Image: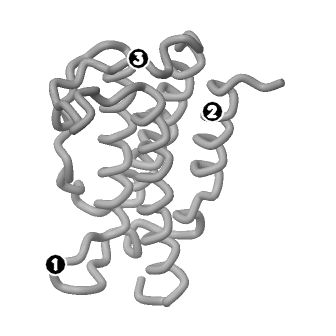
Amino acid sequence: MRSEIARIIDELEREHEGDPWHGIDYRQAAHRPLPGAHTIWELVLHMISWKNEVRRRIEGAPAGEPLEGDWPKAPNPTAEAWRDTLAALESSHRSLVSSVSSLPEDTLFQPTNDPRERESGLGVDHYVLLHGMVQHDVYHAGQIALLKKTGIV
């Protein structure tokens, strides 16, 4: 029987391997389809920030806004900067998976270093944090896929 850690890693890999950003060049990634809407580039940077934040939390850091910011500013759009962003996405994902792989199974339902308290009096545990990460990335990958599919970008 597979462990819950293995199942979570499988979910993380599946949401990442979908690659809705495949075939998108830097001009498409930087295109703002609607006033006030996020670009694909901004969505990818946001995903990187939160992958890094969740990794830091499972390694014991206190909960907070990502060090990179919630919505980091995209760099000037160039092919090289887009490649660097995609490489940073891959790196942040690999680092998160590595940290999850090192997480002992018996810590999944232990609280993270999160000062927030739920109505039940319990903080956010590792299980909720990691499943929330998967849901977060699937949501934003869906936004990217829709932008790509509709031809807006």
The type of residue carrying mark 3 is Gln
Locate residue 129 relative to residue 70 in the image: left or right: right
C-beta proximity under 8 Å, tags 3 and 2: no
The type of residue carrying mark 2 is Ile
Q: Compute the Cα span from label 3 to label 2.
A: 18 Å
Residues packed near mark 1 inside 10 Å, few (<14), some (14 to 19) or many (20 plus): few
Q: Quadrant of residue 143?
A: bottom left
| Coordinates of residue 149 in the picture (x, y in percent) | 54, 84
Tell me the element at label 2: helix
Per the rendering, the mark at residue 65 is: none
For disc 1, the marked residue is 36
Residues packed near mark 3 inside 10 Å, few (<14), some (14 to 19) or many (20 plus): few
Tell me the element at label 1: loop
* The N terminus: image quadrant: top right
Per the rendering, the mark at residue 9 is: 2
For disc 3, the marked residue is 110
Residue at point 29%, 63% (across, down): 77
Of the pair 145 and 107, the residue shown nearer to us: 107
Q: Compute the Cα span from label 1 to label 2.
A: 34 Å
Above or below residue 15? Residue 114 is above
The type of residue carrying mark 1 is Gly
| Coordinates of residue 103 in the picture (x, y in percent) | 53, 14
Q: Quadrant of residue 140?
A: bottom left
Residue at point 63%, 32% (across, down): 9
Choose the circle earlier in sequence order: 3 or 1: 1
Of the pair 97 and 103, the residue shown nearer to us: 103
